[in-house]
Image (spheres, coloured by chain):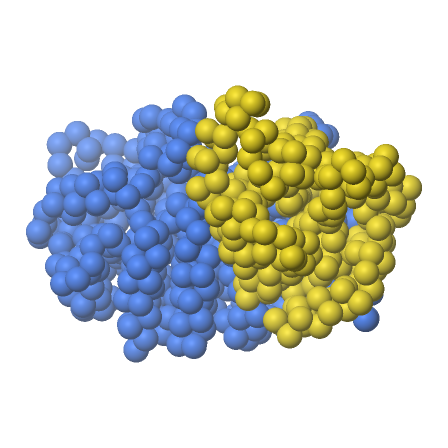
Amino acid sequence: MTSNQSDIFVGWGRSNGTGARHLRPLNMREVDALVEESSMCIARGLGRAYGDAAQCAGGTVIDCTGLSEILAFDVTHGVIRVEAGCSLDQLSRYSVSRGWFVPVTPGTAFVTIGGAVAADVHGKNHHREGSIARYVEEICIATPEGPRIISPNQEPELFWATCGGMGLTGVITEVSLRLVPIATSSISVDTDRAQDLEACMEMLASGDERYRYSVAWIDARKSGRGLGRAIVTRGDHADVDDLVGTQRNIPLAYNHVQRLSVPFTPPVSVVNALTLPAFNSLWYHKAPKHRVNEIQSMNAFFYPLDMLGDWNRLYGPKGFTQYQMVVPFGAEQVVRYTIERLQEAGSPSTLAVLKRFGEGDLAPLSFPMLGWTLALDIPLGSPSLGMALDDCDRHVANAGGRVYLAKDGRMRPELMREMYPRLDQFIEICHRTDPRGVFVSDLSRRIGLTPMPPTHRKGMTP
Amino acid sequence: MNDVTGMPQTAVVIGGGSDIALATLRLLAKRRLRRVVLLGRNEEALNEAAELLKGAGVEDVMTTIFDVSDVAHASEIVEKTVALLGTIDLVFVAAGFLGDANLEVIDPEIVAHSIATNFTGPAAVMTAFAQRLTRQGYGRIVVLSSVAGVRVRKANFVYGSAKAGLDGFAQGLDDALAKTGLSVMIVRPGFVHSKMTFGLKAAPMATTPEAVAQAIVRGLETGASVVWAPASLMWVFGVLVHLPRKLWRLIPG
């Protein structure tokens, strides 16, 4: 154990921090001991969840970054076994040169495998290849009643509750993950501009079959006729033949570097109504109208923001939040409504990302479902934001959609059951594995993901 | 838990009969507020407030008799509140007593009582809550100060001086709470038409409990540390504090 002190923990959005005991176990035995003696704890990885998922006010935050060994790699089947605190970046450094890549990656490589499984993360390939749970062969979790090994065949209920379960079934300590084979570490990318939301959606829909990876960046500031104008980037892993010159000599080079870093938090957000329209306009017009087969490094394609370290500081001391929702196909108007409602509330959004999801999985708290997903980064501190997002929640729930818990810091708890109809099943599984209710996060208390503690219930009687 | 837009789910009010507190809680009930404990001296006023809040959508309203000047029981009341609510997202210190400042009417006991209700009592209770909430790891304390404390004037100098003390105490407490996950928000209303000022002649820029409540909710949403209501009073008092005493004392009423 390398530390035992109190700290204030915040999510990636750098807001709403809460105090907890900070413990950093260095092996599985230490995790087991910790879970056994804790009355209230939650696991934390690299802190990339935007909201309060990895915070445990008044309890213990189990910092898993000390568990980062790569344990085994089966080269023939591409199955890798890692400790849960191993990051995607670390994993890729090991596997890419050997011709294997993570099957699903979010927009940053600086997440842990444990966190990725706990949030059942998705990537630009969800429409074809689903979320990460599909590739998990086995998980080891620490529970108050000792370690458990779970898989789609062994204790499937607990396995699926753990995928997307936000750490509430136990501390994930080890994961076996099936990787995908790649010939090069490059992506062959097609870029297109779409002049409005309709054109963008049509472009994405028509490319579902053709492209393994696809995503649209939307200029969420633009209203009126050009609302939803977007840059659509789509691609697949390049073959060696696609490469030119010296690249061919080392087709599997992996070199993920942070070029720059934001050294301090500016006193006010530099992402604001003055800077955004200019930036967005520049970004939009900089992109080619139509370009095919451009060779990009995997890092440029998957992780453009990783090049700027601590970029979340740009939002100033009040921080920011991300609103990510999904609505079924046919509810396109909710995507438009969300963009318009936030414009009306005067909440500028920098990064708005739109993509299509394929079918969801068996995990009761997994976010993806067949439909459109829209994610918007929004600076906090505006007095009209809370109400605007509440309105969006209502529309999303009415359309049969949901918001993503790994991004959430504010959703309406009353809508949890509507958005996640299998919530009660999840709570029941948690209660069976963790009858004392040891696993608790700020998120779980805020929106009711775990049964209420006894003191809470006592207060209910008038 | 508080959310990233500053909205609490549970709250305790000290001075639960306060018009401003009630108006604030009714606004918060439209958002996330579901469970409330009201503390106050007057049982009838508490019950009335409780009914109103239930009507406004608060699921669970509990009331307990507590006099804010009863410093000896401050810690006990904090424990009792924690037992009722589990975790406390918002502590709203709204107790206050205007009283008289006419030298022909007041006596040492009246002055001591006013200061106990407006300053020492609230300060003691805030301390007890702050200490308990530090263990819980987070929480927001909102305290009703007043422009009367920003520059004390003869018309209400007993009340005003007590609020000046409370305001300073709250600033210091907020600074002391840095890096604990807790914070204090100070609210400085001007003249408010309410039970407390009933029958008094309104001062310029007078406001209502509802307007102050809106300013408070806005302050929670924007993460403010000081809220003026109306907001323009910040500029007005920015000037008034520099007025020479000889002029200041001429201000009537």
Q: Is residue A445 left or right of residue A282?
A: right
Relative to the observer, which residue lies in front, A353 or A319?
Answer: A319
Q: Give the image quarter of residue B160.
A: top right
Q: Where is residue B38? Give x, y as percent.
A: 75, 59
Examine the image and state in which quarter residue A29 appears: top right
Q: Left of A130 or right of it: where is B78? A: right
Q: In what quadrant of the picture does the C terminus of chain B appear?
A: top right
Question: Is A322 or B248 nearer to us in this picture?
Answer: B248
Of A367 and A190, nearer the camera is A367
A150 and A451: which is toward the camera: A451
Residue A314 in the image: above or below residue A174: above
- A418 lies above or below B127: below
Q: Is residue B219 visible?
A: no
Question: Residue A403: x and y, percent?
Answer: 46, 63
User: Residue B134, percent across and down?
Assistant: 73, 39
Name the residue rendered at 37%, 49% in the picture.
A377
Q: Image point 46% across, 44% down: which residue? A: B231
Name the residue: 76% across, 64% down: B45
**Residue A336 visible in the displayed image:** yes
Shown in yellow, the chain is: B
Question: Which residue in the rendered view is the most extreme toward the right?
Answer: B72
The answer to whether residue A1 is left or right of residue A309 is right
Task: Residue A241: give x, y in percent of width and height.
Answer: 15, 44
Q: Where A234 sits versus A225, above or below?
A: above
The colour applied to the residues of chain A in this rendering is blue
Q: Residue at x 40, y 28 (%)?
A: A266
| Quadrant position of residue A443 | bottom right
